[in-house]
Amino acid sequence: MITSVHYVALSAVLLVIGTAGILTRRNLVVLLMSVELVLNAVNINLVTFGRHLHSDSGQIFALFVIADAVAEAAVGLALLIALFRNRQTVLADEVDSLRW
Amino acid sequence: MLDAVFFWAFALVVVAGALGTVTFRNPVHCAAALTASLIGVAGIFLLEGAEFLSVAQVIVYVGGIMVLFLFVIMLVNVGRAEQEHRFSHNAKLATAVSLGAGGFILYLLFSRPLQFAPINQAPSIVQGNTEQIGNALFTTYLLPFEIASVLLLAALIGSVVLARKRAEA
């Protein structure tokens, strides 16, 4: 029997994998992909609790999260192109000018 | 029964795709794995009765965002030498921290039942899922919907400005 707990557990696993990707990868493109993984984990959670509580709001919020993910990916990738044009790198640990 | 089979199949696709995204060496392979994972999430949405969201997931993510990612990967081609060390130097610590956090979440989840019971209210099966979402979106959530469209417009203009070639050079 598949219950809401299973879906939330899947969401937690996806969240952890995405977080590990954000923290460990050097390539900024893959970093942005990991952010998408985290946002999808959030979406599974929202839809699951929306169904658990018999409410439409979960799916509506998941829709808004998808819209936000689109905006985030577009701006993030544009920043990445600007960065590559100026510095010829997309590796996160080579862009540390702001860090002392 | 069939429910369980499909859940575990989709969950396997989601988790395997996510692991591939995080670990593959070549960014193009990462993008392919991420696509598989996102399609798996669409299947999970379908199982949960969110048909509209499932289709939107496929169209927006697989059709839109992944194409954008692949374009950018082609534009900013990193050399082979830079791909040798794909993880940062503190990767072990970061993996340990995220695994610890994940273990804690799963422990909290399984150590006790969900604290709130489902609200006793019959799910509206008269309306289709899409109609239901459309009604909610254009009545209760009209203001957030308009704000989201303004956000998308701002992101559109912002990304064009950011990615544009500088004229003064």
Image (cartoon, coloured by chain):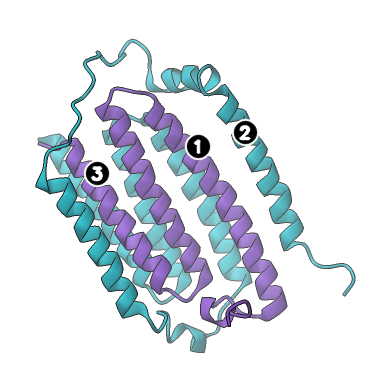
Q: Which of the pair B38/A44 is nearer the observer?
A: A44
Q: Label 2 amino acid?
A: Ile
Residue at the (66%, 72%) spot, across then down: A83
- Which residue lies most toward the bottom here? B81
Display colour for chain A = purple
Q: Label 1 amino acid?
A: Phe
Residue A68's spot in the image, x, y percent?
Answer: 54, 44
Residue B47's spot in the image, x, y percent?
Answer: 26, 35
The image's mark for residue A8 is: 3
User: Helix, strand, or loop for circle 3?
Assistant: helix
Q: Is residue B13 visible?
A: no
Q: CA distance from mark 1 to mark 3?
A: 19 Å
Q: CA distance from mark 2 to mark 1?
A: 10 Å
Tell me: A49 left or right of B164: left
Q: Are marks 1 and 3 in contact (CB under 8 Å)?
A: no
The image's mark for residue B147 is: 2
Labels 1 and 3 positioned on one and the same chain = yes
The quadrant in which residue A85 appears is: bottom right
Residue at the (26%, 55%) spot, across then down: A13
Tell me: B127 left or right of B65: left
- The chain identifier of the residue carrying mark 1 reads A
Display colour for chain B = cyan
Q: Are marks 2 and 1 in contact (CB under 8 Å)?
A: no
The image's mark for residue B158 is: none
Residue at the (47%, 66%) spot, across then down: A31
Q: Against B90, is B17 above or below?
A: above
Q: Label 3 amino acid?
A: Val
The image's mark for residue A64 is: 1
Q: Residues within 10 Å of mark 1 (few under 14, many from 20)?
A: some
Q: Against B6, is A56 above or below?
A: above
Q: CA distance from mark 3 to mark 2?
A: 29 Å
